[in-house]
Image (cartoon, coloured by chain):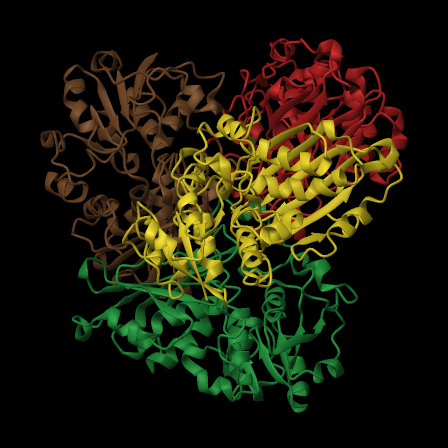
Chain colours: A red, B brown, C green, D yellow
C-alpha cells in the first residue's frame, strides 16, 4: 500500500484526488494538509465524501510528508517549488499540479508568474506529465509536473498534426472554452453563480499563463518554434474544456488522411478516443472521466483543419492525469482507479 | 456471469443501467431492446459509453429475453405488464422500473394510469423494491417493482417517524423538488433547456401519479391510513430530488430524540446516511451515487418536525436502486457496482 | 426632476436601481456611493449599463446625500440606521432596502442581527413598504423600510387567508425556494457557480433572519400571533422566489371559495396577478418584472390549502418594490419605470 | 397606430415580438397566427405576457393579414415565400425573420435549404435587414429579410476590417458560441435541458446554413470573394451569441489603429457599442437588449486580429433587429420600444 500525501487539499483538484484515491486498491492518502482548515475533517468541507474518507486536514509539516512515498501538490503556484527540494532529498516522489515545474525556462516562469523560481536547477529534471508524450520518462521520474487543463486539451489535439509536419506551425489558433471549475474553489466575484451563469465571454486575450506552456509543448512536437493565438473563454458549466483548433494544411499534405493520422497516433492510448470521421464531441461525454475525445475535420475539403478536443478539466486536465502519472510512477496499471465512465446526463 | 436484458434502453434509466453494468464484475447486459432504435449501436445514442459498451439495440423479442436470467424494464408504464407473465413463466426474474407493479390495488392503478392492468394477479407477488423495507423479500423475489424517485426520497424520510408512531399521520406534507431528468429523455416542450432552466415551478398540485405509491408505502409503515399533501416542483438541475417533509409530533413524543431515532433506524443501511444533527444535505452530495442522505430538524424546538431527504433520482431513485435489488436477488454484495462516490463539483 | 441618492450601489439591488432609474422620466440618480469603489465609473463595474449611466461612485458624504430629495440604502444592515437620522433631519426621504427599519421591536432586531439599534425611536415611524398593505402610509412616509424578498412572497401569499380568518394561524408552513442572487454580490464560497449550480439544499432551517419579519407581518394580518415554520432553499437559478405555502382551513371555512377570495383581495393591485384556478406559476414568468403571481389550491378538496407565490427577488423582492414605494412617495403613477414585461425565455 | 400581423407566433421570436410590441406606442399586433394553436390565447402559451396581451391565435388567413400594414414572418423557412407575393401585391410590407429572402441566389437557397424558391424574382428586391449596412434601403423597402443570429454577430465584427481592406479575406475564421434558444422552441431531444446543460460542443462543422448568408454579406463588404471557416458551438445558456473572429492583418495595415477603425465605423450606430481597448464583452451584457457589443484585439501585437462580438440572438439576432427595421420602414425613431437595458444578473 503506497502512502500518499496531498498538500493543499481544499480546492477542487484536491477533492478530486481524495475521491479518486478512495477507489484505489493499492494506495491511500495518509497526509492531507491545509494551513487554513487544519483540524477540520475533510468530509465536513466535502460532504460528498462522507463515509469514505476519515482524513483530517493538518498544517503542512515536512516530517509527516516525508513519510509518504508520493506527495501531490494541489496548491497555487509558488508553493511546491519551496517544499520540493527537501522532500526529493528524502526520497519522496512528487507530482505537482501547479505551474511550478511545467516551464523549462526559469525566466519564462518569472515573466508569467511574477515569482523568481526557488529551485531552477530542478526544472531540467522535472518531467512534463503528459503520458501521451512522456510515458517512459514519467515511469522513471522523481518529479512530475502535471500539465494544465488548456495545455492538455490543446496539445493532444495538435500533436499529431505537428509531429507529422502537415500544418503551418506559424499561425495556429486555439479557441478554448472552459467550465468555471477551471477558476478553482476560490471566493471571487467573477466565479459567482450570478456572474458566471447564463453568460459567456473571452478572457485573457492579451495573454494567459497557459500560453507559454502550450507553446513549449507544441515547439517540442513541431521541432520548430510555433506561433499560437490562444483565446480562452469562460462558459457556464462546471466541468469541461472544449478546444477548437485551427491550422493551415501544408500543400504537401493536401492529400493526407487526417482521420488515419489521428487514429494511428492514439491507437494504444487508454485515455484518448478519436471519434469516427465527422464526429463532434460533447464535453459531457468525458465528464467525470479521464478521457480526451478528439475529432478532426476539414470543412469543405479546404486547407483549414479543425480539431475538436474535449476533456474534463478536473480529471484529464488535473487530478485524473496526475493519478495516471502516479500509476505509471508506481508500476500500477495506468488505468487503476480511473475507469469510471462519464456521468451523463 | 449473469446474463441481463434491458427492455427500453433509450431513456436515462436505461443509459444508467448500461453504465452501471459496465462496472459489474459478475453480470453483463446481453440483450438491449428498443423498437425505435433497433440496429443502432448503444454508443451512438450514448457516446459517453464509447469504448465500454458494444451493444446494439434490437427489437423486443421474447425468445432472446427469455435467455437472460434477469430482465429490467426501463419502459413507460403499461409495457412490462404485457411481457412479464411470459418471461416469469420461463424462469426469468424481472425488475420493473416502471409503475406497472408498484401499486397493490389494480383499481388504483387504473385510476392513476388510465390503463386496465394486464396481470392483476401478479400484483400480490410483486415485491416493492425498497431494500430498506423489504430486503429479505427482495432477495427471494421473482418480480420486483423498483420504486419511483419521489416515493424513495419521501418514504426514507418519513418511515422512522411513522414506524415509531411519533407523528400525526393525518397531515403529512411532502414538498419535493426534482431535477429535470425525472421527466425522462423525451422530446417535449416543457423539458427544453430554454423552458426549464432559470425557472422553478410546482406541478401536479392537483394530483401526481407518485402520490398513491407514497401513500401505500406510508400506510404500511404507519399501520394506519395516512393523509399526505404532496407538492412536486420542477427545478433547474439535471439530477437530484430534495424532499422537505413536514409532520406534527404527537405530544407523547415531545421529548423524543429524533436524531437517535433516525441513526438507529438506518445504522446498518449501506446507502442511507443520516447527517449529524443540524445537517442540511445538498442534492449534489449524492449526485452520481446510490446514496440517500437525510437530516432531521425540529425548528425552535416546536412540534413541527422537518426532515430533509436527498437522492439522485436516476440512481437511488431508479437505476441504482434497481441494481441494488438485482444484487440482492442474485446473492451478490448489495453494493456491487454501486460504490461510486458522488461527483462534486 | 427628483434627485435621487443611492448608498451602497455595488450590489445587485444597487445595480437594479440604476437600471430602473435609467428609464424613469421624472427622477435621476445624482449621487451613487461606495466606499470601496469610489472613483470608478458605475459602467465599469456594471458594463451592461454602458451608454445609459454616466455616474461615478463616490465615498459616502452626508452633504452630497442631503442635496437629494430621496436616498435609497442598498447596503448591508447596520448602515442605514447610522445615517438616517441626520438625513431625515435635513428633509431627505429615505427608502431603506436593508433590514434596519423592518422590525418594529428593537430587541428582536438585536436578537437576529446582533446589533443594538442606532435609532430605535425611528422604528415606530418607519413604514413597512409593502404597498398591498400600507399604500396610503407609504405615500405619506419620510422613512420606508422595503420588505425582504422572502417576506414579500410569503406575505402576499398568506395575507388573504389570514385577513379572512379562514386558516389556523398556529401551524403555517412556508417552504421557500430562492435563486442565488438573494445571497447578494459578495465573494463567498457558497455562492460560487461550481457550488451552487446543479444542486439544491435547504439552509437556515434552525432560524433565518426573515422569519421574524414575516411573522410580524402575518401577525398584523391575523390580528393574533401566528406560528410559522419557514424553510428556505437555495436553488440553481439567478432570480426568483417560489413560496409554497401550506395552511389548514378552519372548519368554518370549509365551503369557502378561495379563488374568489384571492381575486377580490388583489383586484386593484397593479403588481399582483392571481392566476386562474388550477394555475401553477413559474418564477420565470415574473423574471425582470415587478410582478407577484399567485395561485391557490386545495388538493383533493381536503382541508390543506396550498398557495404558490412567485416574485423576482431583485425586483418585487427588492429594487422594484422600493421604486414602487418611491413612486408613491413622490406622487407619481405607481407603475412608472416598472412596466417591463418579464424576460422569457 | 400601425396594425401589425405576426405569422407563426408560437416560437421564441414570435414571443419576443409580442413582448416588444406591448411597449410600442405607435403600433399594435392585431393578427397573430398559428395553425396549431388556433383558438388559444397567447398568454396561455406565454404566461409571462398575462395582463398585457389579449391576442388569440388564429389560423393563417390571407384576408386578415392583408388588413395589416406590416406582417412579420416568425416561421420556419419555406413559409414566407409562399405568402409574400400575395401580401405584397395588396400593399402589405413584409419583414421575414426566416431564411427565405436572405440569400440573393435561388440556387444557393436550394442547395442549403433543399427547397426550390417559390418566388425567386423577389430575391433581388428583398433588402437584407442589417441597418448598419442597409439603413436607407430598409427605410424604403417593401420586403425585408431579417438576418440570422450568427450572421449578425459575425458581420458586425468583420465589416470594419473588410471594408477597410486591412485583413486577408481568404482565410477568415468565425468561432461562434450560441445559447440554446437559437435552436427554437421545438421539442427535440438535443435541446432538452438534460442534454444541453453542463455541456458544450461544436455542431455543423461540415456546413451550417448560416455560412452562405455570412459569406454573401462579407463578400459585399470585401468587394471580393472571402474564404470563411465557420464553426458554431452549442453552449449551456438561454440567450446570447459570442463570435470570436480571427483574421490576418495585411502587411500594409501593420501599423493601423484597429480601435479607431471600429469606433469610427460605428460612431453613429445606436445599437453597436465598441468597447474601450482591451475590453472583453460578456453575452449577458446585451441580454434582453438590441445591442451588439464589440471589442478588437491584436494579441502580442502580432498579425492576427481577434474580434469579440456579442448579441442577444433573440433580439439583435432576430426580433429586436426586425423591430429596428420596422421602425425604419414606418418612419419611427429606430430605437422605439427597443430601449430596454440588458437584464443583469
Q: Residue at x 89, y 39 (%)?
A: D255
Pick whichever, A154 or A289, lies toward us. Answer: A154
Asked if residue C179 shows in the view, the reply is yes
Measured from the top left, where is residue C48 in percent x and y?
Answer: 65, 57
Pick whichever, C43 or B1, lies toward us. Answer: C43
Q: Is A78 situated above or below B175?
A: above
Q: Quadrant of the N terminus of chain A?
A: top right
Q: Is B207 situated above or below A103?
A: below
Measured from the top left, where is residue A193 in percent x and y?
Answer: 58, 50
Is B144 placed left or right of D148 in the picture?
Answer: left
Q: Residue at x 45, y 83 (%)?
A: C135
Q: Quadrant of the C terminus of chain A?
A: top left
Asked if residue B23 shows in the view, the reply is no
Pick whichever, C146 or A164, lies toward us. Answer: A164
Measured from the top left, where is residue D74 in percent x and y?
Answer: 44, 46
Is A281 placed left or right of B191 in the picture?
Answer: right
Residue that extends furthest to the front in the rendered view of this protein:
D89
Q: Residue at x 41, y 37 (%)?
A: B291
Measured from the top left, where is residue D190 in percent x and y?
Answer: 44, 34
Give the tally of numbered discs: 0
Amino acid at each position: 500500500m503506497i502512502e500518499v500525501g496531498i498538500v493543499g487539499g481544499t480546492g477542487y483538484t484536491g477533492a478530486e484526488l481524495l475521491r479518486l484515491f478512495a477507489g484505489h486498491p493499492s494506495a491511500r492518502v495518509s497526509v492531507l494538509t491545509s494551513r487554513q482548515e487544519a483540524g477540520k475533517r475533510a468530509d465536513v468541507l466535502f460532504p460528498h465524501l462522507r463515509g469514505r474518507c476519515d482524513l483530517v486536514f493538518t498544517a503542512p509539516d515536512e516530517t509527516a510528508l516525508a513519510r509518504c512515498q508520493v506527495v501531490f501538490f494541489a496548491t497555487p503556484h509558488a508553493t511546491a517549488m519551496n517544499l520540493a527540494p527537501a522532500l526529493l532529498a528524502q526520497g519522496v516522489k512528487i507530482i505537482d499540479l501547479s505551474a511550478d515545474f511545467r516551464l523549462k525556462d526559469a525566466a519564462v516562469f518569472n515573466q508569467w508568474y511574477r515569482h523568481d523560481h526557488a529551485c531552477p536547477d530542478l526544472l531540467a529534471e522535472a518531467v512534463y506529465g503528459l503520458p501521451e508524450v512522456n510515458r517512459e520518462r514519467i515511469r522513471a521520474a522523481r518529479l512530475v509536473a502535471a500539465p494544465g487543463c488548456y495545455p492538455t486539451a490543446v496539445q493532444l489535439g495538435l500533436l499529431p498534426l505537428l509531429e507529422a509536419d502537415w500544418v503551418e506551425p506559424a499561425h495556429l489558433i486555439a479557441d478554448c472554452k472552459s467550465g468555471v471549475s477551471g477558476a478553482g474553489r476560490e471566493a471571487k466575484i467573477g466565479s459567482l453563480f450570478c456572474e458566471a451563469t447564463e453568460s459567456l465571454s473571452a478572457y485573457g486575450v492579451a495573454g494567459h499563463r497557459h500560453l507559454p506552456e502550450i507553446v513549449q509543448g507544441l515547439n517540442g512536437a513541431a521541432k520548430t518554434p510555433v506561433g499560437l493565438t490562444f483565446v480562452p473563454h469562460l462558459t457556464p458549466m462546471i466541468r469541461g474544456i472544449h478546444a477548437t483548433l485551427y491550422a493551415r494544411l501544408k500543400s504537401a499534405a493536401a492529400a493526407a488522411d487526417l482521420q488515419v493520422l489521428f487514429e494511428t497516433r492514439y491507437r494504444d492510448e487508454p485515455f484518448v478516443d478519436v471519434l469516427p470521421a465527422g464526429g463532434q464531441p460533447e464535453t459531457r461525454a468525458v465528464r467525470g472521466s479521464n478521457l480526451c475525445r478528439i475529432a478532426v475535420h476539414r470543412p469543405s475539403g479546404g486547407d483549414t483543419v479543425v480539431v475538436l478536443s474535449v476533456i474534463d478539466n478536473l480529471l484529464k486536465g488535473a487530478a485524473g492525469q496526475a493519478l495516471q502519472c502516479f500509476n505509471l510512477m508506481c508500476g500500477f496499471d495506468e488505468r487503476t482507479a480511473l475507469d469510471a465512465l462519464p456521468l451523463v446526463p
